[in-house]
Amino acid sequence: MNFKSSLDRIRQGMNLNADFSDQSITARSIPIQPAFYDFSLFPEYKEFTTMEWYYAKQKYSKNQFLAHVGSSDATVTLAGRELINYSSYNYLALACDPRVKAAAKQAIDDFGASTGSGRSITGEVDLHQKFEQEICKVLGTEDAVVSVGGYSTNAFTIGYLCRPQDLIIYDELIHNSALVGCKMTTSRRLSFPHNDYDALDRLLTEHRGKHERVLILVEGVYSMDGDIPDVPRLIEIKKKHRALLMVDEAHSMGVIGPRGLGVTDYFPIKASDIDILYGSMSKAFGTCGGYVAGPKPLVAILKNYAPGVLLYGAAPTPANTAAGLESLRIMQSEPERVARLRANADYFLAKAKENGLDTYNSKDSGVVPIMTRDSELALWLSIQLFDAGICSFPMLYPIVPRDKSRLRFFINCNHTQQQMDETIDCIVENLARAPKSKGVM
């Protein structure tokens, strides 16, 4: 059995898409085997060791889990080498801005490294309220809640709001955090083809009347493809079917629109047209955390009842919250950062297309994929670029389908045209001499 076949067989045993909400599945008697309690026999570990062997053979392992020195900006220092960096979503270079760092340091001096408890007990600091007030002012929403992590905020918001009698309909390319949130519920779940609004409309026409709450999940910028959905069309559809629309703004807030304020800035729409605006503070904000903005009743529900958003966990750290607040203020006072990011992303995308590279659906965002459509080729190309001083990690199966394998480039407002020219030239030169794929991945 070849490498590809054995890997597929291992993954089949992982039951990644199994749904155990049906209690009858666990009612039958199952013989207890070592593979149920010995971690070394878990399919997940077998996959890990198989991939580790292959990565080591291809000399890719040396590029993983390297501790960077200094800030991760348009360049990054790894293993003593400075590389042009396309693997950081620090879009506006705010993670390394002196004012953002100073705000974080001051917050530690004022409140300590941790709040020590949840926000509803003694973990609340005025920074939490100031961030929420500022994000509401910027977006034009009634209220907002800030939480400790971006991924967890998305997952737990979905996981709490949807019940057995409800329906979740999501774009097939929705982020993993949303999928995990869906699996936390016992709601019915349906996906629609990427950006196929007619298909979404048909699904709602067929199924809306069978459920109470219906939640539509999309991203403001899709993190793998770098494309933007037609949000006005989605608003029209959700109003027609009296559904709820949730937009994941992790890669759109701070990036798209004239002021970089996300989908409500990019499109001629109001924040009140969207029921739930979720955002991550780990991208353009340059810190860590998540927030949900929307109507007051929604935020009241999440603040007081949703596990993982505020309940049963520590509050966001003072340092992270202060950094996010300062970043939000800088975004508004220095729109030239967004303008530079936009110019750089447009330049990189145009240059790639001019050189015949496949950039798939990317448009108007900070994410530009270079499609190889072969996992083995994507891995090889990433290694060649790394050796040449360019950091862009591959997106391989099963993260993406095999024929959608790629290198993903996050564009930064501080990238120079020379850096981007060197990068495109290096990609083109290496693809011209790439070995024939053996189809092993």
Image (spheres, rainbow, N blue to C red):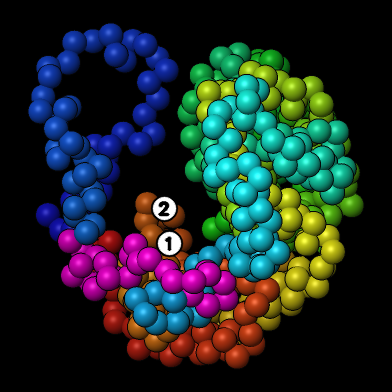
Image coordinates of residue 180 in percent, x first then y, are 49, 34
Judging depth in this view, the residue of 110 and 371 nearest the camera is: 110
Which residue carries the number 1 mark?
Answer: 395
Residue occupying the point 26% across, 67% down: 61
Residue occupying the point 48% across, 75% down: 76
Which residue carries the number 2 mark?
Answer: 399
Whether 15 is drawn above or below 362: the answer is above
Image coordinates of residue 241 in percent, x first then y, are 78, 27
Whether 314 is drawn above or below 317: the answer is above
In the rendered image, the quadrant that contains the C terminus is bottom left
Q: Residue 376 lies in what quarter of the image?
A: bottom left
Q: Which mark is residue 437?
A: none
Residue occupying the point 85% across, 33% down: 142
Say left or right for 161 vs 133: left
Tell me which amino acid carries mark 2. Ile
Whether 100 is drawn above or below 343: the answer is above
Residue 399 makes an appearance in the image: yes
Judging depth in this view, the residue of 416 and 393 nearest the camera is: 416
Say left or right for 231 vs 176: right
Q: Secondary structure at mark 1?
A: strand
Say left or right for 270 vs 438: right
* CA distance separating discs 2 and 1: 6 Å
C-beta proximity under 8 Å, tags 2 and 1: yes
Residue 370 makes an appearance in the image: no
Q: Residue 167 lies in what quarter of the image?
A: top right
Image coordinates of residue 182 in percent, x first then y, are 53, 30
Q: Which residues are magenta?
A: 53-76
Q: Is residue 67 magenta?
A: yes
Q: Secondary structure at mark 2?
A: loop
Image coordinates of residue 312 in percent, x first then y, are 53, 23
Tell me which amino acid carries mark 1. Met
Judging depth in this view, the residue of 200 and 49 nearest the camera is: 49
